[in-house]
Amino acid sequence: MIYLLDTHTWIWWNMNPQKLSERAKEIIGNTSMYDEMLLSAISPWEFSKLLEKQRIGISCNPEDWINTALDMPKLRLVPLSPILSYRSTVLPQPFHNDPADQIIVATAREENATLLTKDEKIRGYKNVKSLW
């Protein structure tokens, strides 16, 4: 099984795991439940934007936080390739217009991964596997 962490899921796992569902915590915390855990390259950017806009705060160097948060067992950072960039713009409709969500959903579809997300808009989207 392959899972893709939505940005908030990745942040919460590393910062505030009590915000995660019991199911998400069980999956992320038990490496025998998956072959790979994926993270879109857009997620560290989204994290950085949250810092920039002061929507979250940390008490350490942001680059250190990112490096530590990326040090998860079986984690693979999925780069934003030109083809993936394109595919994020032609998702089956209807889907909302948040570019980062489009990239994350396109990544899950491309990698045949189940997206771990609390986002209701994504969870209601019929063209990607998701759970919370």
Image: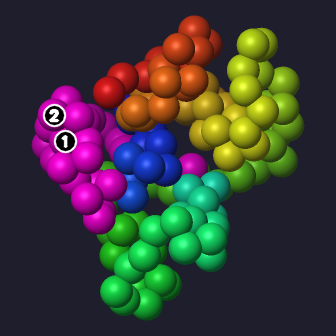
Where residue 132 sits in the image (x, y, percent)?
A: 32, 27
Crowding around mark 1 (Cα neighbors within 10 Å: few <14, some 14 to 19, many 20+) is some
Residue 35 highlighted magenta (yes or no): yes
Q: Residue furthest top?
A: 126
Q: Are marks 2 and 1 in contact (CB under 8 Å)?
A: yes
Point out which mark residue 22 bears: 2
Residue 59 among those drawn in magenta: no
Kindly identify the residue that appears in the image at 61 percent across and 31 percent down.
Answer: 105
The secondary structure making up most of the magenta span is helix
For the residues marked 2 and 1, what is the alpha-carbon distance in whole angstroms?
5 Å
Outermost residue, bottom side: 61
What amino acid does circle 1 point to? Lys
What residue appears at the point 19 percent right and 41 percent down from the top-left corner? 25
Mark 2: secondary structure: helix
Residue drawn 23% across the image and 35% down it:
21
Q: Quadrant of the N terminus?
A: top left
Is residue 31 at least partly visible in the picture?
no
Under tag 1, what secondary structure? helix
The image quadrant of residue 99 is top right
Mark 2, Cα crowd under 10 Å, few <14 / some 14-19 / many 20+, is: few
Q: Is residue 29 among the parts visible in the rendering?
A: yes
Give left or right: position of 55 versus 75: right
Determine whether 69 is above or below 106 in the image. Answer: below
The reply, left or right, for residue 112 in relation to residue 72 is right
Query: The disc labelled 2 sits on which kind of residue?
Result: Glu
Write down the region rendered in magenta: 12-40
Colour convention of the picture: rainbow
Count of numbered marks = 2
Q: Which residue is mark 1?
A: 25
Residue 126 spot, x, y in % from top left: 57, 9
**Image location of residue 96, percent across then percent down:** 73, 26
Residue shown at the point (62%, 76%) measured from the top left: 52
